[in-house]
Image (cartoon, rainbow, N blue to C red):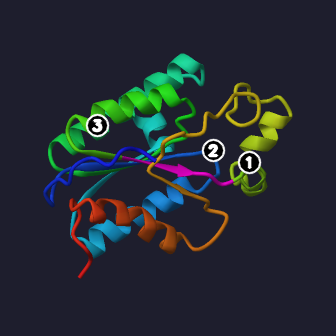
Amino acid sequence: MATKAPTLPTGTGFTLFLTGLSGAGKSTIASELVRQIEELHKRPVTLLDGDIVREMLSSGLTFSKNDRELNIRRIGYVAAEVTRHGGICVCAAIAPYRSSRAEARERISAYGRFYEVFVSTPLAVCEQRDTKGLYARARRGEIKSFTGVDDPFEAPQAAEISVDASRGNVGDEVKRILALPIKDGILKKAA
């Protein structure tokens, strides 16, 4: 567990940074986080989904370690700007390397709170879901450097919360996640 920072005033910007394997449920959880924050807490949210960021902001990047780190650096920069201006940012990216996530944490924490959410769904479940067929292609050698197959995923060591999207209800997991900024006083309880 990360060291608890001092309570900040309600309305302070913060980032929920979801990391985990492809197919872990990051996008599903992120979408529900956005919905609940906007509907129940009446705050606008910026969503930085890894697939969309790759298409719109990082389209020229490969899946090399350097390019993956640059992709997370870009996500961290945008999230820091949202946080700096008092906004809420939800990031959903594989972000396989601890060093990249640590850099994002440092950048964002300069302006508000950073919550690392480890979506710890087991690899076997992610492969079973494989809605895009990526794991199957990686196992056949058609995709190289695929996280979880032939490229590492460095699990967080100090995430604020870990959720397993293969168990329980997404809504319940989202409530657990949102309890963090509520407890810290930067998100009001839903009416």
Residue 59 visible in this rendered orientation of the protein: no
Q: Is residue 126 magenta-colored? A: no
Mark 1 lies on a secondary structure that is helix
Q: Which mark is residue 123?
A: 1
The x, y position of residue 131, in whole percent, is 70, 54
Circle 1/circle 3 CB separation < 8 Å: no
Q: Amino acid at mark 3?
A: Ile
Q: Residue at x 45, y 33 (%)?
A: 101
Please state the extent of the stretch shown in magenta in the rendering. 115-121
Q: Is residue 153 above or below residue 132?
A: above
| Element at label 3 | helix
Decide which of tag 1 and tag 2 comes sooner along the chain. 2
Quarter occupied by the C terminus = bottom left
Pointer 3: what residue? 108
Q: Most extreme residue toward the bottom, as rendered? A: 191
User: Separation of disc 3 and disc 2 at Cα?
Assistant: 22 Å
User: In this view of the protein, can residue 144 be seen by the observer?
Assistant: yes
State the separation of the CA atoms marked 1 and 2.
7 Å
**Where is residue 145 drawn, in percent x and y?**
70, 25
Discs 1, 2 touching: Cβ within 8 Å: yes
In this view, the residue in front, 77 or 108, is: 108
Q: Residue at x 58, y 57 (%)?
A: 25
Q: Residue at x 74, y 30 (%)?
A: 143
**Nearest to N terminus: mark 3 or mark 2:** 2
